[in-house]
Amino acid sequence: MFLRQLYGPDVIRPNHHYATHTVTGIRNYGPLHEFWTFLFERLNKVLKSYKTPNHAGGELESSFFREFHRTVQEARLLGQGAREVEGSELQRAIQVMYRASADDRGTVQALSRELDAAREDDGIKFELSSRSEITVLPSHVYFALLRNLNLRFPNLTLHSYLSPTTPLNSIPLVPKAVAFDYVIINHTRYLASSRAPSDEGSLLAVRSGRQFWVGELQNICVINQSGIGVFRFGYMRWFRPTKIDLEGTVWKQFASSNVHVWDIDQYLGEDECGPGPLIDLQEIFCHVVRLWVVIRGQTCWATVFV
């Protein structure tokens, strides 16, 4: 059970050698013997993960082990530098090196980093990323924000900074905002797809009244303007519900389990029935997993809450 929690069930796969000697090993030496057996099996897997092209004739094993020792020595040097003052240039450089190369693979240090990363957001109810930048809002985000603020603050007349004519006492909405990489809500991190390498961490479900809507979180922004104050928002690109008749299919049965089907590569337009593109970040409910499925001969997206 300890090994399962430490490394995960996918890593521990009993092979013939392991299965043959498990009972005898536990009887003669206790569970600890099998723990060390597993460590040797893991070391073998780590050594084989190194790329050593053009080595043959008995050189493979020695090359693996030589490369492994070189990596261990390098990790020790980097580990000494990691004990520098928090936030120092040397420590930041070492963190970048680890993220870029993962040369501490297979070590206790690597496992510690994985566990730290998995629990990094524990206990955080709401927090924006430490990395951000001041940016000019894209036009579609800007005008969606303008419409939202005029509805939210009817007594505060706002107009576009591009408008040639303005109402009396109207305030121009500044197009600049602070864009963030991610937001942490209830111990879960959600990424802005416009600032991430992929949209995997940006697919999420939002509760709108009694209904859930699923989409891609493209932007996480904060504005701070006189008359409005600090306003945090996310910009969503909503999936379009499929028009395929699901009656009699397995997908109809799973609808009550928050499994939904959408048109592939199709998103709601501004004039279509559905939620607006701007959301309060606190309305985010959870991540979703997106799958490609075929229903009645048509390819669709299916999403599952996670």
Image (tube, rainbow, N blue to C red):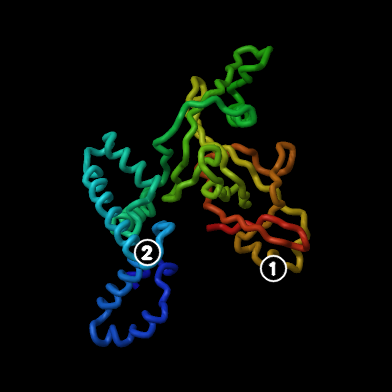
For label 2, the residue is: 60
Instruction: Give the total number of marks visible in the rendering.
Output: 2
Q: Amino acid at mark 2?
A: Leu
> Which labelled disc corresponds to residue 88?
none
Where residue 290 appears, x then y in whole percent?
60, 55
Query: Residue 282, image x and y in percent?
Result: 50, 43
Give the left or right position of residue 5, taking residue 69 as reference.
right
Q: Earlier in the sequence, mark 1 or mark 2?
A: 2
The foreground one among 159 and 295 is 295
Measured as percent of width and height from the top left, residue 296 is found at 77, 63
User: Callout 1: 10 Å neighbours few (<14), some, many (20+)?
Assistant: few
Displayed quadrant of residue 137:
top right
What residue appears at the point 35 percent right and 71 percent down from the top-left corner?
A: 41
243 on left or right of 204 = right
Q: Which residue is mark 1?
A: 250
Examine the image and state in which quarter residue 14 appears.
bottom left
